[in-house]
Image: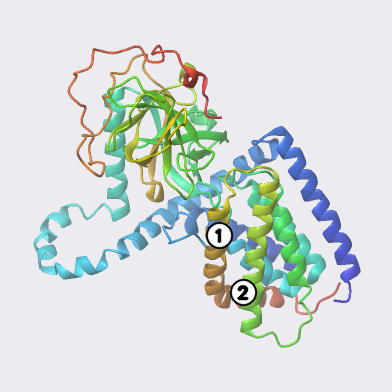
Amino acid sequence: MRRGVLAGAVLLTALLLQAGVVNPLDLPVGHPDLIVLCVVALALVAGPTWGTVIGFTAGLAADVVPPADHTLGRLAMAYALVGYAAGLLEDVEERSVVTTVAVVAVGSAAVVLVFAGVGALLGDARVDASSVADSLIATILYDVILAPFVVPLVSGAARRAEPVTTY
Amino acid sequence: MRDSGRARVVLAVLLLTAFTLITLDYRSGSGGPLRRVANAVFGPIENAVGDVARPIGSFFSSLGHLSSYKSDNAKLRKEVATLRSQLRLTDAERERLADEEKLLHLDQIAQFRIVAAHVSAVGGSLDFESTATIDVGSRDGITANMTVIDGDGLVGKTLSVGPTTTTVLLANDVQFSAGARLESSQLIGHVDGGGRGAMRFTLLDSQGTIKVGTRLVTFGDIGQRPFVPEVPIGRVTRVVPTPGALTRTAEVTPYVGFDSLDVVGVVVSAPRTIKRDSLLPPSPSPSPPPSPTPTPPTTPPATPAGSTSPSPSTSRTGH
């Protein structure tokens, strides 16, 4: 329960920071994706079931939060898959920083590819080779840079919110 | 991985749900009820976040100039006296005031009725979209498909509208398209946002010639929706060779800097007539000057907007 509230608060903060603070920054190539960082961090603690639910919810919110203008459900699908996959690594003992960063890198790439892939199927004109390449490079690069700071912070908070896993 | 069986069921159910949502939303087109609810709920929070984040953003962007500030420290000392009088204004506020003055200037020449707004959030969705949220909405008389401008020229058009926020499709988005006219001529075509690439102008006349440096203005749509006429768009920087094609294509550098949008205006109504080319900035400058001055009235006075030569692009609405 407390973990649910925490996850909600973390995701809401990430969404608002993404649209209001991160996206307006004039960075080269693109921008980091805070939501995938938070989904991975929460799913690594919560396991595959809750990881999927957290990813789906975060994606659905990102699909509708104001400046978004794409077919509803595309991000929900992408983040749900990443939440599930990251959740499968819940039981891995002694996770090193390198593993975490690798999970974030793969997760970021997966989100971009699923989002772009579904977009391409729907005939979204925004999806072409150069936009996919730029989005992949920027999202992976910036997320890998941020991962060592954001993931332990969010995972630690989630672990403290519910010290004993009871489901 | 003790409950990965249950996890798989949950995953399957949620993926199906996402698939259903995609199908439903794709068939109904954008701006469904869920998005309207989200506009109403998240909009005010985004406005609040934007008010806090704006000065922080301009602080970071001013960091880039830090070295040059340091080098002419002595000069700065001389300016302390002047600065003291302006001490009450923060950097962000002064920047915004300058933006607002510019917008007002353009607004006065054209006699548009505009609603001024701040950009409170910028769309990304993994950097595929170029959209923005502004802090005015249906309560301020905004509806979908209105022209959005700033002091430099065309910014975009409004998409979905909430009570206090509006989503704007920026002119550099791939899905953006608007009717455009070459300055001091009747040659018309359409301008399309290029996403990561350059903005493109397509001239709907295989005989017409485009020169580098020519400036573009909006052509205006029927009923002035979504675009009012005569808003400056940009300058032609390269003519793309298209041998044998029925249309001619050119790359356009927009006047508006889409990376640093702050104060914008939504045109809620435009006068029936606007003097041709009257809103364009002076020609030879490579970059848009701070205050656009009207070009001398060499053209015949006040052509009725929208009654120019009927052509395929008049019906173009830029969806």
Please say whether residue B174 is visible from this viewpoint.
Answer: yes
Determine the residue positioned at 69% across, 45% down.
A72
Mark nearest the camera among 1 and 2 is 1
Q: Which mark is residue A151?
A: 2
Residue A133's disc number: 1
Circle on res. A111: none
Using the image, determine if residue A116 lies above or below residue A40. Answer: above
Judging depth in this view, the residue of A164 and B209 nearest the camera is: B209
Secondary structure beneath label 2 = helix
Nearer to me, B265 or B253 = B253
Disc 2 chain ID: A
Q: Which quarter shows the N terminus of chain A?
A: bottom right
What residue sits 10% from the left and 64% below the top? B75
Amino acid at circle 2: Val
Q: CA distance from mark 1 to mark 2?
A: 25 Å
Confirm whether residue A1 shows in the render.
Answer: no
Q: Residue A55 appears in which quarter of the rendering?
A: bottom right
Question: Quadrant of residue B60 in the image?
Answer: bottom left
Does residue B138 lie above or below A34 as drawn? Answer: above
Disc 1 to disc 2: CB gap under 8 Å: no
- Residue B212 relative to residue B189: left or right: left
